[in-house]
Image: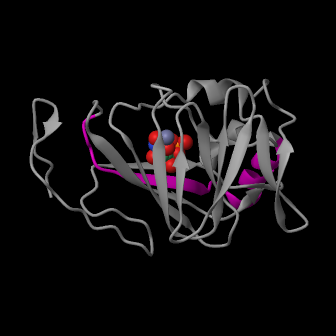
Amino acid sequence: MELRVENGRIVYPFSVGFNSANGELDDFDTHIERYLSKLINVFADADAAWQYLRDNGDKLIYEVYEKNIPEVDGEIRFCSSITYPGKIGDEYFMTKGHFHSRPDTAELYYCIRGKGCMLMEKKDGRYVLEQMYPGRAVYVPGHYAHRSINIGDEPLISLPVYPGNAGHDYGTIEDSGFKHLVVDRNGKPTVIENPEYGRM
Ligand code: PAN
Ligand code: ZN
């Protein structure tokens, strides 16, 4: 259904359908698709990313369906975030990750399908990894960059909810990356230091 917005605010209640099998949001306003060809530098092993492209062609790594909730204080934005299974080298498919432009704003991710983890990392490099699986919610406090990582073999589907005025700061992560990576070591997700940190 159409959102009713007046003076930049939602003025009428609505509900929305969420497909827990494929993550699609009914009547979405925006659909973002992130393909590997545009994410080469997101993965620590760029050579492995190029090799993947040569071997398989381009690949949808993750996608997001959103409603156009006004990005202002007092509103609540939410979306459907779907990260597909796979690896580049030994690094799992994942989202770009970001800080919020208003860095003190928090976020809640409710996991609907799949198996993954949320890497949360502060600017000083301190990090926390939380598991994501159906029925589990992850609270991301302010000042933590966050990225969802699919460590399973089916789509990782979650419903992130965050303050309307949070905004997205992608530049900080684009410039230096996360200090930590989650990689497959003998079939087990393992956190390592990012050898490319600071020189992405
Ligand atoms: C989420 C993310 C979504 C996609 O809605 O935006 O999972 O990840 P990237 O934004 O890192 O590409 C969120 O954290 N919003 O604030
Ligand atoms: Zn966020």
Quadrant of the image containing the C terminus: top right
Q: State yes or no: residue 149 in magenta.
A: no
Q: Which residue is at 52% across, 34% downward?
A: 142
Query: x and y percent of residue 10 in the render?
Result: 15, 42
Query: x and y percent of residue 143 in the render?
Result: 57, 30
Judging depth in this view, the residue of 102 and 53 nearest the camera is: 102
Q: Which residues are magenta?
A: 47-70
The extreme right residue here reads 186
- Check the image and tell me how it is coloured: one colour
Judging depth in this view, the residue of 136 and 86 nearest the camera is: 136
Query: x and y percent of residue 81 in the render?
Result: 47, 55
User: Quarter of the image holding residue 198?
Assistant: top right
Q: Is residue 158 left or right of residue 38?
A: left
Q: Is residue 122 above or below residue 97?
A: above
Judging depth in this view, the residue of 143 and 112 nearest the camera is: 143
Q: Is residue 170 above or below residue 184?
A: above
The extreme bottom residue here reads 21
Q: Which residue is at 57% across, 56% downward?
A: 60
User: Quarter of the image holding residue 128?
Assistant: top right
Is residue 96 visible to the viewer in this orientation of the structure?
Answer: no
